[in-house]
Amino acid sequence: MTWKGPDAERPEGPLTGPERPMLQTDPARAAADYARLTEEFKLADAAVAHASLDDTFTHRGELMSLRMIYLHMIEEYARHLGHADLLRERIDGATGE
């Protein structure tokens, strides 16, 4: 993917690949996994550093914009945070106001 600059590099490692080992939890790997996650954030930020929200690209035959990607990510975070809140609520019984 290119956003008015060099192609973004996609590292292979714990968060990628067909076996998706990121779905396997191991407390001993937590620090390394978090470091990889923050590296992914940095690569994503660098890939769009000079992009406009209205810049577009084609993915699997569908035209998308950076704005659409950001909105999708906000939606996904909200959904997963909602799930986590429901789990926490079942554990401690506290509800938010």
Image (cartoon, rainbow, N blue to C red):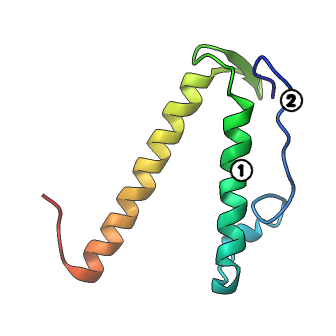
Measuring 76% from the left and 70% from the top, which residue is drawn there? 21
Which residue occupies the foreground of this view, 43 or 2? 43
In the image, residue 13 above or below residue 40: below
Closer to the chain start, of discs 1 and 2, is 2
- Quarter assignment of residue 68: top right
Which residue is label 2 attached to?
7
Which residue occupies the foreground of this view, 64 or 51? 51
- Quarter assignment of residue 60: top right
Quarter of the image with the N terminus in it: top right
Amino acid at circle 2: Asp
In the picture, measured across the screen, residue 97 lies left or right of residue 42, that is left
Measuring 52% from the left and 36% from the top, which residue is drawn there? 72
SS at circle 2: loop
Which residue is label 1 attached to?
40
Which residue occupies the foreground of this view, 44 or 92? 44
Q: Residues within 10 Å of mark 2 (few under 14, many from 20)?
A: few
In the image, residue 93 above or below residue 64: below
Measuring 69% from the left and 20% from the top, which residue is drawn there? 50
